[in-house]
Image (tube, rainbow, N blue to C red):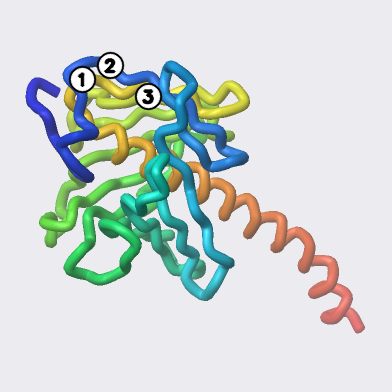
Amino acid sequence: MEYPFPVIDLSYCAPYIINLQINTDKGATYDGNGDRRFYIKSPRLTLHDRCVLCDDGGNPILTLYWKIMTMHRRCQVFMGESNDSSRLLFSVKKAELLQSGVMRLEVFLSNNKKESECDFRVDVVSGKRSCHVYAGESPTVIASMQNNGGFNVVVYCNVDYAFIVALLMIVKDINFFYDGVRDFAKAITPVALSIMMS
């Protein structure tokens, strides 16, 4: 981007390319020097799945929050450790499955009430092997990720890298959730069939 575009905070917009690595098992994000920048604090699972992204000092930056059984798996992201509607930053929903098994997520900023067009979009290759984050419906890539046993991330100039980290945590959790639903369905199908046959 030509000018800084803060979603979380201007301090996370650098005038140069940022390289990050996300350890998806630990939920921790490291910069190119190996210093931890962010980590995920996850309370116990409740009716509403919820986790908090903190900086390395333990300060909550934002909260990722979504209903487990929401039809479109809409995730809402709030400033700080909150779910107050006045502190909503953006929301993400699963849009469609594109050709060759690419999943698309649409991102809507809090001031985009009509949601007729998304503010950002994320195209995720099946298996989370890679993804690209785009500005709106344009072909402009603002960040990209390659999965090599962890998320290796490139965030382009003037892009809010805390925002990108939050999006990639959502990518990881949404995929994990779908895998869990699929495995659960496979597990209960034989039981359901045996009940029906008895």
Q: Is residue 195 above or below residue 54?
A: below
Residue 164 in sight in this render = yes
Q: Are marks 2 and 1 in contact (CB under 8 Å)?
A: yes
Q: Amino acid at mark 1?
A: Cys
Q: Which residue is mark 1?
A: 157
Find numbered disc 1 in the image and state the secondary structure of the residue it sits on.
Answer: loop
Quadrant in the picture for residue 138: top left
User: How far apart, in angstroms, are the residues tagged by discs 2 and 3?
Assistant: 11 Å
Expressed as whole percent of the image width and height from the top left, the position of residue 51 reads: 46, 58
Frontmost of labels 1 and 3 is: 1
Which residue is rendered at x = 34% and y = 62% of the image?
81
Q: Earlier in the sequence, mark 2 or mark 3?
A: 2
Q: Amino acid at mark 3?
A: Ser
Tally the numbered discs: 3
Expressed as whole percent of the image width and height from the top left, the position of residue 41 reads: 49, 54
Frontmost of labels 2 and 3 is: 2
Q: Residues within 10 Å of mark 2 (few under 14, many from 20)?
A: some
Q: Which residue is mark 3?
A: 144
Which residue is rendered at x = 30% and y = 46% of the image?
106
Of all residues shown, which one is farthest toward the left? Answer: 3
Q: Which residue is mark 2?
A: 17
